[in-house]
Each structure stands twice: as structure tokens, then as C-alpha cells.
Amino acid sequence: MTRDYLGELVESWAEFDWPERQEWLNRHPQFITPIDGAAVHFVHLRADREDAPALLVMHGWPHTFAMQLAYADLLSDFHVVVPSLPGFAFSSTYAAGGMSEERLASTMHVLMTEVLGYDRYLTYGEDVTANVNDLIAARHPEAVQGILVTHAHFPTPAERERLVAPDAVAFFGALRSRQESMGGYAHMQGTRPDTLATGLNDSPAGLLAWLVEKFVEWSDTPSGDPRRVEQRLSRERLLTEAMIYWTTPSIGTSFRPYFDDMDADIPPVSVPASVHIQRHEHDYPESVAREFYRDLRTFERLEQGGHFAIAEVPGDMARRTRAFANELGLL
């Protein structure tokens, strides 16, 4: 983030046509349902064909459901469900107890099966829902027809100590080094979330800087000028994210995945998997993917698209999703 770019964003936000953007959001049918003590908000885009495949699309941090809609809009031949995680945007936190990956996986599975009535579905998650995605597929192979992945499985810290494949040792060693110099945001969110949230909920400029910095840093954006993030994620989309966090206000509760215990032990996934490594983790070890996803149909490294791959290159990812569903005989 730079002072000049932040100034431009703040000025644009002051002039932002929020009513027009709300109209766009409301063209996506949205609902709220109670699950496990949380009021869970979700978008449900139904295909014309009743027997179309169902697809769960989960978001991570710092983005919301809204950043996933460009991708969802391209999949009119799927029943697409885009939830807000508990504590994000228009979903409440859990009324009691912490947030864990196991609990999130259970919530999302209940949404797809018990609330919406899908016996079988495809699943996709990223960032803080990457492990949730893996858990759903591992725990419910009878319901999950296939798993789409751009953030492939990360072993637990204890499991990483036992890795011997050279590509795996190199990747996780480099990751540990990067976290020491670039992980300040996660340390703050995991240790002083309410103090941080007080400042961000009091300052729209502070909130905007905190959010957009990560979109710049983690997306497939050339270095040197943060404005270039808008080649992938338009200013309108960035301001929509900021506005949702500001009006809810949910930045503090969005820190729960960092504060609560989120490291689940996940068994290998046996359902068909389509893995597309985004450029933010371009050197992710293929050996780990092949060990974890036991029915790996595709492993590739994306030429375009970073941490927010389905938001950055929605057309490319929609084509890959459709190809995977075709391979499974679902379209």
C-alpha cells in the first residue's frame, strides 16, 4: 500500500454509488438460515435444469461472498451456493463456542444437505476454507462428488517435520521464512483481534488499507505499483468488500479463524480432485498433493491468478470447473 493509492481509494469510496452496488448484489438471491447457533447467510443461484450439479463455493479472508460472485455468475449450468462464513458479512458468529475447521465443515455440509437438500455436491474452498474444503471431502465422501482446489492441502506443523521429499521440504521451509517477515497481520489478528478491530471499525481509511494491502500482496499483481491490483480486481469490487465489512461491521469477527484453534487433523481425500495451484503458491509440492488427494484427476500450476484465483480469473476457473464436472459425468 502507498499513501497516494490509499488516498485515491478513499476519495473513490466517498463517491461510491452504494445503492447501485446493492442493486447488483440483490440480483443474486440471498437467504439466512440457522445452523449450529449461527445465522448463516448464503447466495443460492439455481440452474434451469433440476438435476444440474450442485457446487459449494466458500471464501477466505479478507474477502467476502461478494468477491466470489463473478465466478458463480458464469456457472449457470450449476446450482451454485456461496455462503458467508459465520462472523463474516451478513452471517452471525456462533452463539457459543469457538470456530474450528471441523465446525465450519459441519456447518457447510449441513447447509448443502439438510437445508438445501442436495444429496451430492462439488466443493471449493480457499485460504481459511482450504482445510474446510479438504475436511468436507474427507469426512463426507458419500456426499461429495468431487473437490476443486486452488489452495492445496497444507500438512499440520507436526506433519511437516516428517516430510522428506525435496520439493516439500523446500516449499515449507521457504513458507516458514516468509511468515517471519510477512505474517504480522496474522499475529495481530490471532493475539489482539478486538484491539485491532476497534481501530479498523473506527477508521474507514484504516479498514480500507488493511483489506486492500492483502489483495495487492496476495493476488497475481506485478510489484511496484499497488494500483495494478485493479487489473485483476476492479476498484468497484475492492470498495464493495470494504463497504460490506464497514456496514456490518464484521472485521473483528472475521478474525476468529486466526484467534481460534483451526489446525485440524485431516485424513487423505479419496473423492476425485482437480488441483490448480495458484501463483501465490506457485511452487507448492506436487508430491504432497499426490499423497493427500488419492484420486487426483488434474494437477496443474496456473499461468494466471493468485491467492484469489476464482475472483481474479473467473472465466478460466469456470472453464476448469466445467471440465472437471464433465469428466465426472455431471454435465
Image (cartoon, grey):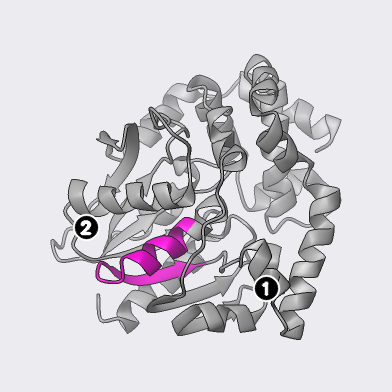
Q: Kindly report the distance in space between the C-alpha atoms of the residues bearing marks 1 and 2.
A: 34 Å
The one of 61 and 312 positioned closer to us in this rendering? 61
Residues shaded magenta? 132-149
Indicate the quadrant where residue 328 lies: bottom left
Q: Which residue corresponds to the image point at 32% horizontal and 60% vertical from the top-left?
A: 55
Q: Residues within 10 Å of mark 2 (few under 14, many from 20)?
A: some
Q: Are marks 1 and 2 in contact (CB under 8 Å)?
A: no
Q: Which mark is residue 284?
A: 1
Q: Residues within 10 Å of mark 1 (few under 14, many from 20)?
A: many
Q: Which residue is mark 2?
A: 47
Vertical placement of 22 versus 259: above or below? above
Indicate the quadrant where residue 305 lies: bottom right
The picture places residue 63, in percent across and down from the top left corner, at: 55, 42
Image mark count? 2
Q: Is residue 136 magenta?
A: yes
Vertical placement of 109 versus 193: above or below? below
Q: What residue type is disc 1 on?
A: Tyr
